[in-house]
């Protein structure tokens, strides 16, 4: 609104007023607005306002060859791009009946878990910043960068890897990569006590986070909550364990849960998942040298790839929750329809709107970040 | 969380924990330049010597970031499959997915290990670049993401073709090549990257990418439709074409080119013949122009022109001296390469459109060119090369010395020929191979053994015959001697007994003229009671008559025609082998050209007052 058009309106005094959070706001990783109705510093109602990152990917994908869509998929969720790639490839493989070589499956697991670690470090930092602590944020971003270095070496790209391809992966690991992964994991693991000291036993954080934005298990199930947010309500559900894909059924790892369902529990679940992901990657690093063989099964010429007609829903566990592609093929060289089930869609819209009611204004950003909602995934 | 005690409120000394960080390395990135990883997907590098401008990168690019730019000065040769196009990248669109690298048929594109490009506002167009091997900034950065066997998305291996083993095929004229089955054809068709190099290289510019894609999509009738857009000799070219398309194929630069010829053959064999006739008749003019065209010679050139002209509503009569149509395809190419029944199908399609062929009608004997000129609005000559050339060595005029064309014609026409117990062939081209392998089969049938010697001027590296022909001839028992120059036909008791040859020192003189020099010390005698000369052919132009021969323009013994195949006479055209190189598909291309020219001439006549 331009100043010259602004006219002060004479209205009766009111206790209620409106406040816009966003569309640019450090409370969430992307452009996303949240309109609040407040009474004093209490939130009466919140309305999620998505759409600032709508790039029309699902429609765009209908006009592109199956393989060209590979470049779009990671862009749907920027902080955790790998599950997008992998589940899209799983969908195409399912429709085509492709058998992915074992080595490629292990490589995918490594990439998925590295991505989970990177995403969790990212979200830690953000969550800490919303409670006024900026050091964990700088640390989180800096430590995430070490994972990006590994990604650069493994996939050729730091953020958008485009490493998976239906049928397998595009490159084998460079020489000595296993040692470098182990080195980085050792370092990150040695950093965890620092994070605990700085954040998880920090009384400022503990007091701010406990009891903030609680979700009961019942509510979580009704609202479609998945991932760490669901496990923070005490329900042990993880796609990796309950509907295993790739080689997760051959790996040893725990599914951490917490009971309270509040922001504190959600942060703790992520913190404990970090350790499990490190454990998984160590198993992959130990296993990979025993797996010789191809990294991709033979696939048709990408320019003439007609995927058999049918539809499929392939889900994976991303750092945010259950992420899946619903893909429909009419037998052509382009998808007939694609739809991505981004877990953030539920977390950032219906859950956030409910949780905001009744909380204080300074907790809104914390609730947003503790849900780990990813706006590009909501809008796509 | 059990291992984190969040009830621990710390002690008084808690803040002193900070001190432990003094001794640690900072967790920030160092500021100095740092090399990108060996796989990094940075800016594009393109080796212009390897790049052929096939535009596959442009086709697979997700974001339409690649524009093919014509670079003057670079080689452009459709026959070799090289265009002077090079990819230019718009980095406002590029997403660095490197699919262009993985799908590049030649492996010329790579991405560099270069992180940063930045510019002033006035240089915004520096985001649109035409990369060469030195990359975006002209500074040599090493390759990052490049072609590797891991990432290659081009299928380099061709589907194997089932062929008869030498032992099975040596005593009969059954077709050697079995053709693809449906599955093989599908897989082979799927390899095509649709670059269109084949289309550019083909003399008649067949729509190979389109029919290959139709085969891949299971639309075989669509494939036949694409084939008939440019080539009525579809069965023939599916079998014996010189397949310049495959030489130009971009996939052939690192692997085996797409088997374009076999795919055409597959499509033609797979579709019902009656349906093929319907498809070929699509788009035919539904009026009669009232113009009459006479075509002399029912070979590929003549019948292609006839096919086109009939489709345009003209009345076409083809005059053929032999008892059957097809010209050299029938009378020059042995059955094991080109079965007569498939040629009959091609002819059936052409005649089903209304082309009239008068067989056993030799122009110059049965009727004259003057009469043709009087009775028809236009006349086309497509008489082929039916006169075998002679080596003219001493003894070459003996009755026991034959020309390859004559023998091949006799065999194809079903005439009985005297099969020699041993034979010597002079010549190293495909016709020499044809006669050698034909005689080998006949010898096998009559005597149960093959005794054939083939001598050629060229050494094996410069043989004119296809490599496959040489290999298969050897498998069938033909002895091939390279770099031998014929000197004399040897006679014993009035009968041919063999050939005496000298070794060849060089074939051409310093000016590049044909002037073979021999080494008399390197003399060999080849025994044979038949000597066959297969060293080239000429057109028999006696049919023209003296008066016409006088009026027409000639160039080194060949009838001279313009770019449209027209002679210096307004009503007379010539096409095919007699004016252009001897292969079927060039003759077909010639036929189209002449038909266009005749049609234009007749149409103009129509509108003239």
Image: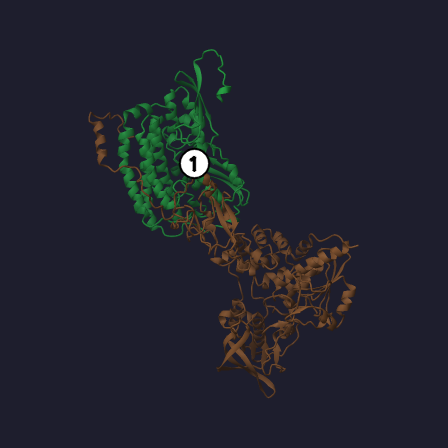
> Relative to the observer, which residue lies in front, B115 or A237?
B115
Q: Which chain is green?
A: A
Query: What is the x, y in percent for residue B249?
Result: 52, 57
The colour scheme applied to this rendered structure is by chain
Q: Farthest left residue?
A: B13
Query: What is the x, y in percent for residue A285?
Result: 32, 46
The answer to whether residue B446 is above or below residue B192 is below
Quadrant in the rendering for residue B302: bottom right
Asked if residue B592 lies left or right of residue A113, the reply is: right
Residue A252 appears in the rendering: no
At horizontal 56% and vertical 71% (from top left) the residue drawn is B429
> Relative to the observer, which residue lies in front, B270 or A33?
A33
Q: Which chain is brown?
A: B
> Relative to the observer, which residue lies in front, A258 or B499?
B499
Query: What is the x, y in percent for residue A222?
Result: 44, 27
The residue at which mark 1 appears reads as A77
Q: Label 1 lies in what chain?
A: A
Query: What is the x, y in percent for residue B45?
Result: 43, 50
> Relative to the observer, which residue lies in front, A26 or B399?
A26
């Amino acid at each position: 609104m331009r100043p010259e058009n602004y006219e002060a309106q004479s209205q009766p005094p009111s206790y209620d007023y409106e406040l816009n959070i966003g569309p640019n706001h450090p409370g969430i990783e992307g452009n996303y607005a949240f309109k609040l109705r407040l009474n004093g510093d209490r939130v009466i109602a919140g309305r999620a306002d998505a759409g600032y990152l709508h790039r029309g990917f699902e429609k765009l994908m209908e006009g592109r060859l199956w393989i060209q869509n590979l470049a779009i998929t990671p862009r749907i969720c920027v902080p955790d791009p790998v599950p997008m790639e992998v589940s899209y490839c799983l969908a195409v493989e399912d429709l085509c009946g492709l058998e992915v070589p074992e080595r490629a499956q292990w490589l995918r697991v490594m990439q998925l878990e590295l991505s989970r670690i990177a995403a969790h470090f990212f979200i830690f930092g953000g969550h800490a910043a919303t409670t006024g602590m900026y050091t964990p944020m700088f640390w989180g971003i800096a430590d995430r960068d070490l994972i990006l270095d590994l990604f650069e070496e493994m996939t050729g790209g730091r953020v958008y890897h485009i490493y998976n391809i239906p049928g397998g992966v595009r490159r084998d690991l460079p020489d000595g990569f296993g040692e470098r992964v182990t080195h980085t994991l050792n370092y990150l693991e040695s950093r965890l006590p620092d994070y605990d000291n700085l954040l998880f036993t920090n009384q400022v954080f503990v007091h701010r986070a406990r009891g903030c934005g609680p979700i009961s298990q019942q509510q979580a199930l009704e609202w479609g909550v998945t991932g760490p947010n669901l496990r923070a309500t005490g329900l042990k559900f993880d796609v990796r364990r309950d509907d295993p894909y790739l080689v997760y059924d051959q790996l040893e790892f725990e599914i951490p849960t917490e009971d309270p369902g509040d922001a504190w529990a959600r942060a703790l679940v992520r913190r404990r998942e970090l350790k499990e992901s490190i454990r998984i990657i160590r198993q992959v690093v130990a296993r990979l040298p025993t797996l010789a063989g191809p990294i991709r099964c033979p696939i048709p010429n990408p320019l003439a790839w007609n995927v058999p007609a049918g539809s499929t829903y392939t889900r994976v566990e991303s750092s945010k929750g259950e992420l899946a592609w619903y893909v429909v093929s009419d037998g052509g060289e382009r998808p007939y329809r694609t739809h991505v089930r981004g877990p953030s869609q539920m977390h950032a819209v219906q859950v956030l709107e409910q949780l905001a009611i009744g909380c204080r204004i300074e907790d809104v950003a914390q609730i947003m970040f503790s849900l780990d909602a990813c706006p590009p995934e909501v809008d796509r | 969380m059990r291992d984190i005690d969040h009830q621990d409120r710390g002690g008084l000394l808690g803040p002193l924990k900070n001190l432990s960080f003094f001794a640690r390395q900072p967790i920030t990135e160092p500021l100095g330049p740092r090399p990108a990883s060996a796989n990094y997907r940075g800016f594009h590098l393109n080796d212009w010597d390897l790049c052929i401008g096939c535009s596959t990168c442009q086709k697979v690019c997700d974001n339409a970031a690649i524009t093919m730019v014509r670079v003057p000065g670079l080689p452009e040769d459709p026959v070799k499959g090289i265009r002077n196009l090079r990819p230019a990248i718009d980095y406002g669109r590029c997403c660095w997915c490197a699919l262009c690298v993985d799908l590049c048929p030649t492996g010329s594109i790579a991405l560099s290990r270069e992180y940063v490009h930045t510019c002033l506002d006035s240089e915004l167009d520096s985001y649109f670049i035409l990369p060469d091997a030195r990359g975006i900034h002209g500074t040599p950065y090493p390759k990052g993401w490049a072609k590797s066997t891991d990432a290659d998305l081009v299928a380099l291996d061709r589907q194997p073709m089932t062929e008869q083993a030498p032992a099975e095929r040596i005593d009969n004229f059954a077709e050697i090549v079995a053709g693809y089955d449906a599955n093989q054809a599908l897989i082979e068709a799927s390899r095509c990257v649709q670059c269109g190099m084949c289309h550019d290289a083909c003399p008649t510019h067949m729509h190979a990418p389109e029919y290959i894609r139709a085969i891949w999509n299971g639309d075989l009738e669509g494939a036949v439709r694409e084939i008939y857009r440019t080539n009525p000799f579809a069965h023939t070219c599916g079998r014996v074409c010189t397949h310049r398309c495959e030489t130009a194929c971009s996939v052939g630069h690192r692997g085996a080119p797409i088997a374009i010829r076999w795919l055409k053959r597959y499509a033609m064999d797979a579709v019902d013949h009656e349906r093929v006739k319907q498809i070929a008749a699509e788009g035919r003019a539904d009026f009669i122009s009232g113009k009459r065209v006479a075509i002399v010679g029912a070979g590929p050139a003549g019948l292609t022109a006839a096919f086109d002209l009939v489709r345009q509503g003209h009345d076409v009569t083809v005059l053929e001296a032999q008892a059957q149509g097809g010209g050299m395809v029938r009378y020059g190419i042995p059955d094991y390469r080109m079965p007569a029944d498939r040629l009959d199908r091609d002819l059936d399609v052409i005649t089903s459109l209304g082309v009239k062929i008068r067989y056993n009608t030799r122009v110059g004997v049965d009727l004259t060119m003057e009469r043709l000129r009087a009775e028809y609005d236009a006349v086309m000559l497509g008489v082929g090369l039916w006169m075998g050339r002679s080596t003219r060595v001493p003894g070459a005029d003996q009755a026991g010395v034959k020309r390859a064309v004559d023998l091949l014609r006799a065999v194809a026409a079903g005439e009985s020929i005297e099969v020699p117990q041993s034979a010597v062939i002079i010549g190293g081209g495909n016709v020499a191979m044809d006669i050698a392998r034909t005689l080998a089969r006949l010898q096998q049938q009559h005597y149960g053994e093959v005794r054939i010697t083939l001598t050629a001027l060229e050494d094996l590296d410069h043989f004119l015959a296809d490599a496959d022909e040489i290999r298969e001839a050897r498998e069938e028992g033909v002895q091939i001697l390279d770099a031998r120059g014929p000197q004399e036909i040897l006679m014993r008791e009035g009968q041919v007994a063999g050939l005496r040859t000298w070794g060849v020192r060089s074939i051409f003189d310093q000016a590049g003229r044909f002037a073979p020099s021999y080494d008399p010390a390197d003399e060999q005698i080849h025994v044979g009671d038949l000597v066959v000369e297969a060293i080239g052919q000429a057109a028999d132009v006696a049919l023209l008559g003296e008066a016409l021969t006088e009026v027409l323009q000639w160039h080194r013994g060949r009838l001279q025609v313009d770019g449209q195949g027209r002679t210096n006479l307004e009503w007379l055209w010539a096409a095919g082998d007699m004016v252009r190189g001897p292969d079927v598909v060039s003759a077909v291309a010639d036929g189209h050209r002449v038909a266009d020219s005749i049609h234009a001439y007749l149409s103009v006549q129509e509108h003239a007052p």
